[in-house]
Image: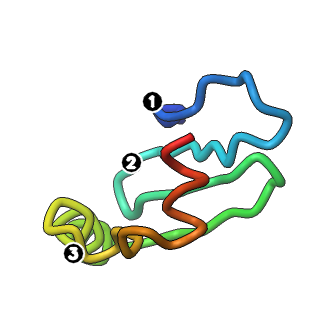
Amino acid sequence: MFIKSSRCDGQQETCGCVNVAIVRDAVVVTDEEGNVSKFDHFEWRDFIAGVKEGEFDLPAGSPASAAVAA
């Protein structure tokens, strides 16, 4: 079963939503364009740890950072 990102409100034409399914052998991620990525559980654990540690945060003041805040 896929779980839709809580950040996706469906209000925007292209909201960048992702869906995640955690299955026995992998974690499967899909986006709204139909792209599919598959990760093993160790890769997913490391990715989530990086997110929590701010490894993927946008630099303050960057144009992309301002767009996300809007």
Q: Residues within 10 Å of mark 3 (few under 14, many from 20)?
A: few
Q: Residues within 10 Å of mark 1 (few under 14, many from 20)?
A: few
Residue at left 54%, top 50%? 68
Q: Which image quarter holds the C terminus?
A: top right
Look at 21% across and 75% down and name the residue there. Answer: 46
Q: Position of residue 39 (x, y in %)?
A: 43, 72
Helix, strand or loop for disc 1? loop
Q: Amino acid at mark 3?
A: Asp
Mark 1: which amino acid?
Ser
Residue identifier under label 1 = 6
Residue receiving disc 3: 46
Dot 2 alpha-carbon crowd within 10 angstroms: few under 14, some 14 to 19, many 20 or more = some
From the image, tell me which residue sits under label 2. 22
Is 45 located above or below residue 33 in the figure?
below
Lateral position of residue 19 relative to residue 51, left or right = right
Q: Residue at the location (36% across, 69% down)?
A: 60
The residues bearing labels 1 and 2 have C-alpha atoms spaced at a distance of 16 Å
